Amino acid sequence: MTAARTATTLARGALGLLGAGAGVLAYASLVEARAFVLRRVEVPVLPAGADPVRVLHVSDLHLTPSAVARQRWVAGLAALEPDLVVDTGDNLAHREAVPFVLSSLGRLLDVPGVYVWGSNDYYAPSFKNPLSYLLHPSRPRGESKRELPWPDLDAAFRAAGWTDLTHTSTTLEVRGLRIGFRGTDDAHLGRADYARVAGPVDRTAVDVSLAVTHAPYRSVLDPAVADGHDLVIAGHTHGGQVCVPFYGALVTNCDLDRPRVKGLSQHVAGGRTAWLHVSAGLGTSPYAPVRFACRPEATLLTLTARGTDAAPGSAMG
């Protein structure tokens, strides 16, 4: 083969790879990032004989005014008529996004709800080298230091009757059940201090107990499970965002292991076992608007009665 023919072959090969890469990128940004899906999961945490409780878990909206498809899809979730909404943060990605978050949630704001904050509620996102995620969790330094109007969103949530769980606890009665909640601030920003709400779950005061946080770091998961919570709910990971088919996520962007980067699993700590649900979330940073083998999602968690052989906070094999 002549040098000219070799060069031509190599050039065609390079163009082919570039074309394939461009095709994958287009699919990841234009198709899969907008291929929203509702997951349905049952979690056996209620007392025997209790009626099911339907909990809508939304996370990581990362809304901007231009994210019209995401806004419309989220608005349609109200048709599910859940009994409770849990929002695990990162609602915002733009200074003018608050009214778009509220209009997207729409009638869901009439449903009892609880929420915590994520880093991209507090600070606007900024460009980062996407390859750095393969080496270590992102290292937020207050993001761009451009604060987002999360206090306005907080005021609107509170006015709707939702409860901010940041380093606090509360109990809501839902379908005749006393559901206890404890929450923390964002562990990814180093703001989580579970010790402020720590203590064994009081089973005389609640029928089921949920811990809520944005990022599922073990510094929150371990003490929450050891305290006897039945279910821990989190987001943040985006399910890995860019995954390899038949392998899964490459990273979790926290210290959670890859197999539990999204969905329902179990977590063991302090001799106890609890359920853990991590949402892959609905959005992405506007600087990395791609998803691959990891569709954006919300989850309808149906809390059901425990088996007779599983006591609250015990090992659930």
Image: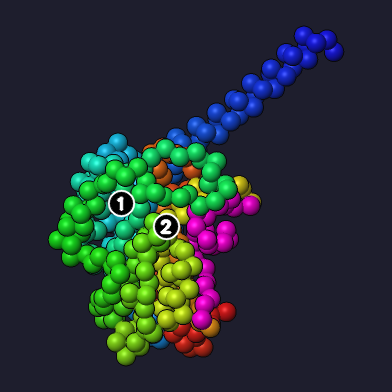
Q: Is residue 309 left or right of residue 20?
A: left
Viewer-proximal residue, 169 or 209?
Answer: 169
Position above or below: 286 against 111? above
Q: Position of residue 164 (x, y in %)?
A: 25, 65
Residue corresponding to mark 1? 121
Position above or below: 99 against 314? above
Amino acid at circle 2: His
Quarter of the figure with residue 40: bottom left
- The residue range painted magenta reads 247-270
Amino acid at circle 1: Asp
249 is within the stretch colored magenta:
yes
Residue corresponding to mark 2? 188
Q: Is residue 231 visible?
A: yes
Q: Position of residue 288 (x, y in %)?
A: 44, 39
Residue plotted at (37% across, 69% down) = 193
Closer to the observer: label 1 or label 2? 2
Q: Position of residue 260 (x, y in %)?
A: 54, 62
Tag of residue 228: none
Q: Tell me the SS state at disc 2.
A: helix
Q: Tell me the SS state at disc 1.
A: helix
Quarter of the figure with residue 174: bottom left
Q: Position of residue 150 (x, y in %)?
A: 24, 52
Residue plotted at (46% across, 83% down) = 313
